[in-house]
Every structure is written in C-alpha cells, then in structure tokens.
Image (cartoon, rainbow, N blue to C red):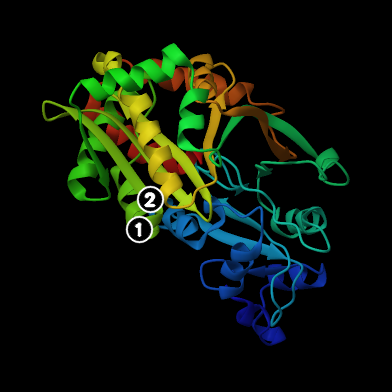
Amino acid sequence: MTAHVVASTEETLTREERRTMMSGVFRIDPLSDPRWLSLLERHSEASIFHTPEWLRCLHRTYGYEPVLYTSSPPGRPLSDGVVFCRIDSWLTGSRLVSLPFSDHCQPLAGPCGAPAVLLKAEDVGYKGCKYVEIRPLDFRGFEEPVLPRFQANEEYYFHSLDLRPDLDVLFRSFHKSCIQRKIQRAERESLTYEAGRSESILAKFYHLQLLTRRRHRLPPQPLAWFRNLIDCLRDKLTIRILSKGGQPIAGILTLSFKTTLVYKYGCSDAGCHRLGGMPLLFWRAIQEGKQLGAEEFDLGRSEIDNRGLAAFKEHLGATRSKLAYFRLAPRESNGAPRKRQLRIVRYALARVPGPVAQLVGSALYRHIG
C-alpha cells in the first residue's frame, strides 16, 4: 500500500490503517513508494537488505508481504523507517520479522529516532503475531526505550573487513598458512575462474550448494530463490566459480550496495578443499570489489558454535563483533527450541536422498524465515 492510499478518504481506510495513522506512524509499501529508495540512497546505515530489489525477491519466492513504518506523513520525504515482512504460516505461526533470510536489517533512524517509530510500529502491526523480531546490526541507542520490551533471542558473530588499504597490505594481513599459502596453491593448480549471473554459472553454483547443504545436514534453498535474486538484483549480484578439469569445486555469491561488498553464500566440493579454492575466491572478490570502489566487505553472520567459519573470516583479517536478534513477546524465551528443531531436521536430512532434500527445502523455507 502506497502513501497515496494511506492518505485516501476515511471510508476507504482499513481499521489497521486508521489505528496506524492515529499512532503517528504511517504504513507504506516499500516496493512502490519512491521515497523509500530516496531514503536508502542518503542514509548511512542502509544496506542491500533494505532495498526494494531484496524485498521483491522475498515476496516473489516466499510470498512475504513487506511493510514499512515511518513517522513521515504522506507527501513528505521519509526521515526514518523500519521495514518488516509479515510471515503467515500454518506450520510456524504468524510473525513480523525485520527481515527474513537477511543477516541484519538496521532500523533507520531519523531526527525523531527509529526506536520511537519501532515501538509504535509493533503496537499497530503486532495483532495476530506470535512475536515481532528485529535484527539490528548496531543496537546502541536502542537500549531505552526499545530493548527492555524485547528479549535477545539469538546471537551470532558478525565479521567485517576494511577494504580501504592497498591490495598488498590486505594480502599481508591474511593468515600466512591458512589463507596466503592456500591462495598461492590455488594459483598453481590451473583452476578455471568465472564470474557472472548466467544460467550456466548458476547451475554450477547450485550443484555445489546442494553438496554443501547436504554435508551440513541442512535443507537446500529453492533454486527459484537464486533465480529471483539474479532477476531482481541484476548487477548488484555476482556469482564466482572455480573449476578443476571442468568440474566446479568452489563458489561464492556476493552482493553490492554503495561502497559495501556483501558475502551471502558460499559452497564447495569437500574433496577439493586442499586446492585452496575458497581463499582464492575471496581474494578475487576483494580485488574486483576494490576496483568498483568497495570500502567494506560485509562477511555476514556466523553461528557462535561454528568456530571453523568464524576462524576463516578472522584469518582474512576481518574484525568480529556480536550480532543479536531481538523479539517482542516471543513464545519461546530463547533460541533453544529452534535449535532442537534444527537438530531433528539435520538428523532426518542426513538419511534421505538428495532430490528428497530439495523437495523438503522448497516446501520448508517459506515457513522458517
């Protein structure tokens, strides 16, 4: 729903829309209101996960309806905004999430401050939901009055690499044996490198993704998700693949927004890890990102108990911080029940054929965002 619709005559407003306007918070459609994109272009904390392209991909693939709450009235430029997707699931219940399948999504503060908007947004949008979840990259300034009403539900590590130094400085900052020598080994192996968004590159990437998800006992994301990402994000997305003898051995998918390069997905053939493919792919991404003006490499979240992944990112020279997700009135006071469910899923997936796991993933993902 656009701001023009929100500003329509009283008799056309729904009960929720009237309640929203009376609260001093306005609800708009971030997919169609150009003011949202204008705010993203000038706001220092905007990320790829705020963009209409990312939201459109979530809507296409999983049917999630994005909604934006702001204190800015119709007809005026947006000064702040908190974007959610409402997930309605018969399996896992209804909830407001900011945002599903997104590592983080900072509430964008303005002169009035995002916390005030966030409090009112959850008041007007909470009806019928199990919980409201926010995923701020930086929650400083949200302690009062927001976070006392929310509970920390899950915690992760977040890693970021400063790309402003020269390439030779960045290379020397890599761990000598875990990264530098593996890059040099990969360069001696006559690996074939390709980057882009073609169907053939996607096919190689998805083949590796299936291998990796099965190795980790997790359902694979639907192929439609990656196709929609390519179609919606276009030149903001790059898939990089390394092959040996015509067979793909490692792949990563990165996104870009302003001066930030974002690592979103990585996958590999475990039998070829010794060839150093993944370190070389990250090095290529850094080199190419710097050529396009990237100043930061957002390496995304890592499970706290996944020490290997966290160590790999730190061996690249990345800095580590805590990333916390917060919920208002959750039925589950922490992430333990979800982790138990995940263990059950992993146990089952380790014992089913690959095609069955794909079907499970396609059916399951829209319920777990």
Q: Residue at x 69, y 57 (%)?
A: 125
**Pointer 2: residues within 10 angstroms few (<14), some, or many (20+)?**
many
Residue closest to the eye, 345 or 53: 53
- Report the residue at 46% width, 18% height from top: 344
Residue 307 locus on image (x, y percent): 53, 15
For the point 24% across and 14% down, the residue is 271
Is residue 191 found left or right of 265 in the rendered image?
left
Whether residue 355 is situated above or below residue 101 in the rendered picture:
above
Q: Which residue is mark 1?
A: 234
Taking depth in this image into account, of 327 and 18 the one nearest to the observer is 327
User: Are discs 2 and 1 less than 8 Å apart at CB?
Assistant: yes
Q: What mark, if any, has residue 237 been given in the picture? A: 2
| Residue 220, horizontal then vertical, whole percent | 34, 32
Name above or below for residue 241 compared with residue 187.
below
Q: Quadrant of the N terminus?
A: bottom right
| Residue drawn at (27%, 44%) of the image | 195
State the image coordinates of residue 162 (x, y, percent, origin top left).
57, 37
Q: Secondary structure at mark 2?
A: strand
Disc 2 marks which amino acid?
Leu
> Please, what secondary structure does the residue beneath circle 1 have?
helix
